[in-house]
């Protein structure tokens, strides 16, 4: 692909530290009764979670609905303050160096913040100017990236509110690509996309890592996607980290638990967590 993107060289942190180090991270949500303001329920959304992500790694987070994936992504992207634990991103402390960290990361999620009355072109030009890119060639780059992601040229100048959720998701991914984040946080980037678009986005994610040296953390429900894209996968259940390994390693660990061969990631997930990936977490009780 011939699109030129902003070189992140000036923002590129030193090579010797891991991309992300998470130590003993915890986050509890308390739900109160509206009437008596009594705590009704506590949810340990993250429970003593520790792991490292290497540079240029695509690191998957796999868990059922409600297992804590989005909470983890929101903490890493500085949107949510944890109750305990530390996070270092390229050696920077999440709490002390928040402003610097924000320049290194980009989060793509379904609720991507856009001006919905403006078009994809206008939104992306705005984002690029915020990141200090100006001058000729931007419009051509934007059209080229959106077409590469499978968004038809005729959609580029239409207000975003008139585009489907999947199309808006592609615009969010284009924005992440154009602003060249050093760490990209993807919260279920292909959920709701048709198979062709899913493939386009997955190719794009690989390209982003291979050609632009991005480190990528990716939440997904999709076993095939995790296996295809991720160098290592963290299995999370009820806010706890159950295992971190590559897909084959997870299958071996599951086989040791099950006492029989485990051939698929889906089976491995089941033996490691005791759950089917399609079920939801039951809410926990008040402590
Ligand atoms: N703001 C909040 N207030 C109360 N509880 C919350 C809040 N945010 C998340 N939770 C709870 O924390 C737990 C983890 O939620 P989270 O959104 O991280 O899960 P998830 O794995 O991303 O789920 P999904 O796959 O459905 O997006 C859930 O039980 C959820 O209901």
Image: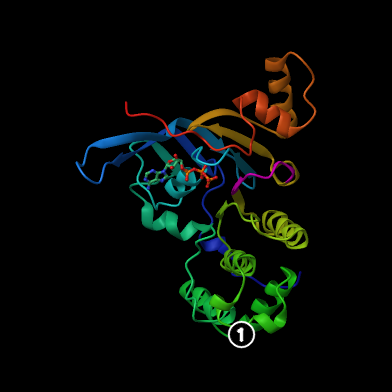
The residue segment tinted magenta is: 217-224
Residue 52 position within the rendered picture, expressed as x and y whole percent measured from the top left: 54, 36
Compared to residue 217, the image places residue 282 above or below, namely above
Residue 222 magenta = yes
Q: Report the quarter where the N terminus lies.
A: bottom right
Residue 102 magenta = no
Q: Secondary structure at mark 1?
A: loop
Compared to residue 269, the image places residue 229 above or below, namely below
Residue 239 shown left or right of residue 159 in the figure:
left
Residue found 48% across the figure and 39% down from its top? 68
Residue situated in front as seen by the camera: 124 or 170? 170
Residue 252 shown left or right of residue 11 in the figure:
right
Q: Report the quarter where the C terminus lies.
A: top left
Residue 260 position within the rendered picture, expressed as x and y whole percent measured from the top left: 77, 16
Q: Coloured how?
A: rainbow
Residue found 61% across the figure and 86% down from its top? 136
Q: Quadrant of residue 284?
A: top left
Q: Quadrant of residue 263?
A: top right
To which residue does mark 1 refer?
A: 157
């Amino acid at each position: 692909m011939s699109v030129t993107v902003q070189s992140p060289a000036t923002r590129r942190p030193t090579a010797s530290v891991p991309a992300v180090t998470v130590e003993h991270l915890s986050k509890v949500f308390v739900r109160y009764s509206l009437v008596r303001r009594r705590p009704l329920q506590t949810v340990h959304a993250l429970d003593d979670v520790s792991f490292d992500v290497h540079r240029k790694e695509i690191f998957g987070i796999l868990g059922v609905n409600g297992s804590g994936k989005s909470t983890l992504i929101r903490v890493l992207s500085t949107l949510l303050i944890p109750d305990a634990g530390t996070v270092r991103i390229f050696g920077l402390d999440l709490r002390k160096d928040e402003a610097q960290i924000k320049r290194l990361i980009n989060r793509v999620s379904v609720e991507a913040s856009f001006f919905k009355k403006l078009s994809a072109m206008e939104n992306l030009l705005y984002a690029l100017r915020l990141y200090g890119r100006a001058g000729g060639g931007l419009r051509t780059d934007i059209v080229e990236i959106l077409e590469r992601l499978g968004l038809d040229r005729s959609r580029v100048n239409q207000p975003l509110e008139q585009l489907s959720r999947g199309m808006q998701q592609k615009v969010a991914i284009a924005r992440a690509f154009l602003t060249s984040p050093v760490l990209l946080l993807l919260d279920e980037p292909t959920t709701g996309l048709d198979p062709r678009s899913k493939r386009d986005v997955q190719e794009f994610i690989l390209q982003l890592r291979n050609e632009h040296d991005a480190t990528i953390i990716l939440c997904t429900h999709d076993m095939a996607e995790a296996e295809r894209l991720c160098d290592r996968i963290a299995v999370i259940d009820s806010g706890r980290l159950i295992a971190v390994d590559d897909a084959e390693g997870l299958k071996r660990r599951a086989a040791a638990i099950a006492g029989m061969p485990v051939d698929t990631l889906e089976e491995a997930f089941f033996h490691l967590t005791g759950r089917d990936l399609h079920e939801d977490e039951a809410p926990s009780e008040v402590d």
